[in-house]
Image: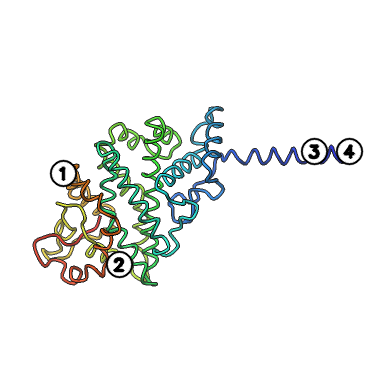
């Protein structure tokens, strides 16, 4: 009997050691790094903040290189951002319908507004993201109403989540941990040196953060939308270029920025990364940079649901049929 007890104790000890080893979460792959599936960057990571902090502190105490706990660190700051936004990260799934995700879609953009309003002198990119968001959210909802276009709706929702996981997590790190937390994300390989340098002066980083968003975070997802065969992604993304509104005051529409043969249609597809960044960097972002704090505040303080409703297709039917009825810009997309 005593021998059996000793053997049982050894087995339990071995099981405990194995369990202890698994909670280190080292060298996990980023199996959901683009945010297209439910949850965060890896399904084995827990969502309890205390558990995550304990694991991180163990690794830091042992001086383990941050690159080995990249997934854990990134996940931790995504969890913190989700908590701040009031979003249940474990249930966030862009593959669900847009209506099923509507509360999360709105909560994320309300979070961006709140961060801007609380830190207007520093977190200026958040104001830009919120101002451009109603058109993006309206596109998710409108495309989600048509079964054959739900792929495009899901991709737009994936882009929103991907941006939140990247820039939202960075903002959470900066707010809760300062520049040292941002530098740890750099050391882990989550962000690059250029992005880290921009955090030295976030008030003047709208262009830098927008470039990261458009040229590093979501371009592959736009490419996949455009390359879709049925319905043709080239047609759908061009229609988004034509129909989407331009929410930044003083900004041009794609057609006004680069008209096709001088007519009312744009000479580029917004899904094309080079054309998109040319448009945003030379027109949309500068238009936002020219806005006063009061003007930005006036917009982002308006209920987000009201602004989305103004950009839904049903509310803009005449604009979509006759997009340039006057000299005033009516269409565009961020």
Residue designated by label 4: 3
Residue designated by label 3: 9
| Residue appearing at x 49%, y 47% in the figure | 30
| Residue appearing at x 52%, y 29% in the figure | 60
Callout in the foreground (1, 2) = 1
Which tag, 4 or 1, sits closer to the chain's start? 4
CA–CA distance between discs 2 and 3?
63 Å
Mark 2, secondary structure of its residue? helix
Residue designated by label 2: 236
The count of marks equals: 4
Query: Does residue 34 lie above or below 77 as drawn?
Result: below
Neighbour tally class for label 1: few under 14, some 14-19, many 20 plus, Cα within 10 Å:
few
| Residue 179 percent coordinates (x, y) | 37, 31
Neighbour tally class for label 2: few under 14, some 14-19, many 20 plus, Cα within 10 Å:
many
Q: Which sits in the foreground, 188 or 74?
A: 74
Which tag, 2 or 4, sits closer to the chain's start? 4
| Residue appearing at x 29%, y 68% in the figure | 235
| Residue 120 percent coordinates (x, y) | 25, 39
Mark 4, secondary structure of its residue? helix
Residue contact between numbered discs 3 and 1, judged by CB atoms under 8 Å: no
Neighbour tally class for label 4: few under 14, some 14-19, many 20 plus, Cα within 10 Å:
few
CA–CA distance between discs 1 and 2?
32 Å
Mark 3, secondary structure of its residue? helix
| Residue 53 percent coordinates (x, y) | 52, 36
Q: Which sits in the foreground, 34 or 200?
A: 200
Query: Does residue 192 lie above or below 140 as drawn?
Result: above
CA–CA distance between discs 2 and 4?
71 Å
Query: Does residue 147 lie above or below 70 as drawn?
Result: below
Task: Report whether 111 appears left or right of 76.
Answer: left
């Amino acid at each position: 009997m005593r021998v059996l007890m000793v053997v049982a104790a050894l087995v339990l000890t071995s099981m405990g050691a194995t369990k202890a080893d698994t909670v280190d979460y080292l060298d996990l792959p980023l199996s959901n790094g683009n945010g297209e599936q439910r949850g965060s960057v890896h399904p084995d990571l827990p969502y309890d903040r205390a558990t995550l902090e304990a694991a991180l502190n163990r690794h830091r105490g042992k001086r383990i290189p941050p690159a080995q706990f990249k997934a854990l660190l990134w996940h931790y700051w995504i969890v913190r951002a989700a908590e701040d936004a009031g979003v249940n990260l474990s249930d966030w799934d862009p593959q669900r319908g847009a209506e099923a995700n509507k509360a999360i879609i709105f909560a994320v953009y309300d979070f961006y507004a709140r961060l801007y309003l609380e830190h207007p002198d520093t977190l200026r990119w958040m104001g830009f993201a919120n101002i451009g968001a109603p058109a993006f959210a309206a596109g998710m909802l409108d495309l989600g109403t048509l079964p054959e276009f739900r792929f495009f709706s899901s991709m737009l929702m994936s882009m929103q989540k991907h941006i939140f996981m990247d820039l939202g997590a960075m903002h959470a790190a900066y707010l809760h941990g300062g520049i040292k937390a941002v530098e740890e994300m750099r050391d882990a390989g989550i962000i690059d040196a250029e992005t880290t340098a921009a955090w030295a002066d976030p008030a003047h980083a709208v262009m830098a953060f927008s470039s990261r968003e458009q040229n590093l975070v979501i371009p592959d997802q736009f490419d996949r939308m455009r390359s879709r065969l049925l319905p043709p992604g080239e047609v759908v993304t061009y229609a988004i270029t034509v129909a989407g509104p331009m929410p930044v005051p003083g900004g041009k529409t794609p057609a006004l920025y680069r008209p096709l043969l001088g007519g009312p249609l744009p000479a580029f597809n917004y899904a094309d990364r080079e054309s998109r960044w040319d448009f945003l960097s030379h027109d949309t972002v500068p238009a936002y940079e020219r806005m006063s704090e009061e003007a930005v505040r006036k917009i982002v303080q308006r209920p987000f649901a009201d602004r989305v409703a103004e950009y839904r297709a049903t509310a803009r039917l005449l604009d979509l049929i006759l997009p340039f009825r006057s000299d005033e810009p009516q269409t565009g997309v961020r």
